[in-house]
Amino acid sequence: MKILVYIQQDDGKLNSVSLEALKGAQEIAAQTGGTVSAICFNSDVTTQLAGYDLTEVLLAEDDKLNTFNPLFYLKAMEDIAKAESPDIIVFGHSYEARDWAPRLSVRLDIPLISDCIGFKKEDELTFIRSIYQGKLNSDSVVKNGAFIVSFQSGAFRVDGIQSGSAEVRNVTVDLSEVNDSISPEEKFQEAEQAVDLTQAEVIVSVGRGIGKEENLEMVRELSKILGAEIAASRPVVDAGWLESSRQVGSSGQTVSPKLYLALGISGAIQHVVGMKGSKHIVVINKDSNAPLFEIADYGVVGDIFEIVPQLTEKLQNA
Amino acid sequence: MKICVLIKQVPDKDSSLNISDDHLTLVENNITWVSNESDNYALEEALLLKEKHGGEVIACTLGKDSARQVLKDALAKGADRGIFISDSSFDNLDVLSLGKIIASSLEKENFDIIMSGLQSDDQGNSQLGLILAELLNMSHATLGMGTEVVDDSTIKVKKELEGGWFQWTKLSLPASISIQSGINSPRYATLKGIMMVKKKTVDEVTSGDVAADALESNVTINKIYVPDKTKETQFIEGSPDEISEKLVELFRNDIKVLN
Ligand SMILES: Cc1cc2nc3c(=O)[nH]c(=O)nc-3n(C[C@H](O)[C@H](O)[C@H](O)COP(=O)(O)OP(=O)(O)OC[C@H]3O[C@@H](n4cnc5c(N)ncnc54)[C@H](O)[C@@H]3O)c2cc1C
Ligand SMILES: Nc1ncnc2c1ncn2[C@@H]1O[C@H](COP(=O)(O)O)[C@@H](O)[C@H]1O
């Protein structure tokens, strides 16, 4: 089993999700007797990569690969996959990977099992995906031939990465024929974040379970008495009920308050990555199977419209 | 501008999901079916582009018979016609095969733009838009949070990146664009729109119309199951009154956030 891990670099640094994926590749290799090599498009990261337990580090350098452009990255990987014939190509499921790995799957005509949360080696090598927004899991197996797999953020712990010393080998790719039908411009952030949730001690966070904008009043009262900042999951911001700087998650802020009180939030991974570092997580949700209970320290299975007003009243009298 | 919008029918987020005895499918009778969330935003974006620049919006779905409803909803909101791709031999195919089937169904239409949601709320592959881009030789962008037509052959898409960053990217048409939720405010169907649905056409595609090799999927799902609970969550029980009382104590004595 020859495993090739694509290592994304962000401004000269190793991307953490692809580093976790590298750990995943090492674990797959350990259980299947395979070998792991890494491939990167930037020499800034090769020294660090060479310090891990890898067969080799492949480096493809070209001016056209300095910043991300899916069509150039695709052609480079296509050339490399054809020359190296890996059995598995591993990605971290980053936003960048979303923007080219599926096209690579078509280009090489091999499947991509995307956004996996882990794997197991039973009779067959089985990949675990989280489906229905975290409510269920599925076990996938590739029938035959090479394939691509991408792993979700948090699927493996980087601190377990095996170190070693790997040789760096330069590989050549031919990008001369790639068309320029996709031209990315500079990255930017919207105007200053209006709210900084990262320093908040207490956060009361609302999800779609709040139902409608008027119901936010009840949450405002609770957070006032708790001295808390209000935060939200994405649908509440999408609906325009709260400003976007109050969104917690992969496309919002990452918070770590002493108390994160989640009201009517189901616990999709994109929300969880933004709040799992909170010291105490208290979840109120009417669905006892809501995935967010899985990371809660304290859980209440119940209706926020029954509990929140009572809680506010009790805190007022406390 | 000729725009295709891909819409998948998925269980409503509040449906209870019970797994059948085969450990592969869901018990369907307590599921409410709806259009995938990000696809609603994709449809709205397509309708806005049409209103501004003229053209045609065609809604397309691949699914079981019940999935006709997502096309009806899209037609009621203003799509001009529908493409319904359905056949029992399409069940249990992996996303690459589904992409090949959809691509061969759409190829002759020569769309300027294919809009899709950034991911399906059931399978969550986050792949189909790009699979189509490659198969139909289009440019692409993912996680669109804004669009701006530059001229007849160019569109700009504002892509969402991680942690609050964005990036405009210029695409030569034809382009496949996946849309992130929140890009716009999806409209509701009007009564007049609903009345119009009967007058609009829906083309049907079955397995005989698509390339045979698409029907061979290389990924098997062995089972679906409820994830194991690994964390010991302490559950607080009782009447709302008792629960609130216990929460106050918890906040005061254990978490220590009350002064
Ligand atoms: C690329 C990408 C980026 C994303 N970025 C983010 C992000 O940054 N942040 C984010 O939050 N999401 C993000 N999402 C969206 C994410 O996948 C989920 O769709 C979203 O987090 C769901 O929000 P929710 O839990 O509020 O809604 P739902 O999943 O609809 O859950 C609502 C919950 O409320 C409960 N509920 C309903 N009524 C009541 C009641 N009366 N009392 C108690 N409980 C009730 C229900 O049981 C349910 O569990 C992103 C998605 C993608 C694909
Ligand atoms: N069966 C389908 N019918 C129509 N559109 C689909 C189908 N499956 C996926 N899509 C589209 O592709 C997007 C991404 O889906 P996925 O790759 O499954 O996450 C969805 O948001 C839809 O717009």
Image (spheres, coloured by chain):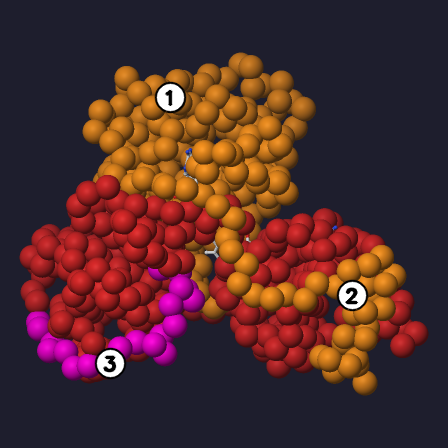
Chain colours: A red, B orange
- What label sits on residue A220 in the rendered view? 2
Location of residue B11 in the rendering, given as x and y in whole percent from the top left corner = 55, 37
> Where is B102 relative to A151, above or below?
above
Q: How far apart are marks 1 and 3 (CA)?
A: 51 Å
Observer-side mark, 1 or 3, equals: 3
Q: Residues within 10 Å of mark 1 (few under 14, many from 20)?
A: some
What residue is shown with label 3?
A163
Which chain contains the residue that carries disc 2? A
The answer to whether tags 1 and 2 share a subunit is: no
What residue type is disc 3 on? Ser
Is any part of residue B157 visible from this angle? no
What residue type is disc 1 on? Asp
Which chain contains the residue that carries disc 3? A
Magenta run includes residue A165: yes
Q: What element carries label 2?
A: helix
Is B195 positioned to the left or the right of B36 in the image?
A: right
What residue is shown with label 1?
B87
Ligand 2 lies in quarter: top left
- What label sits on residue A152 in the rendered view? none
Q: Does the residue labelled 3 lie within 8 Å of ligand 1?
A: no
Q: Is mark 3 on a helix, strand or loop?
A: loop
Task: Report the span colored magenta.
Answer: A151-170
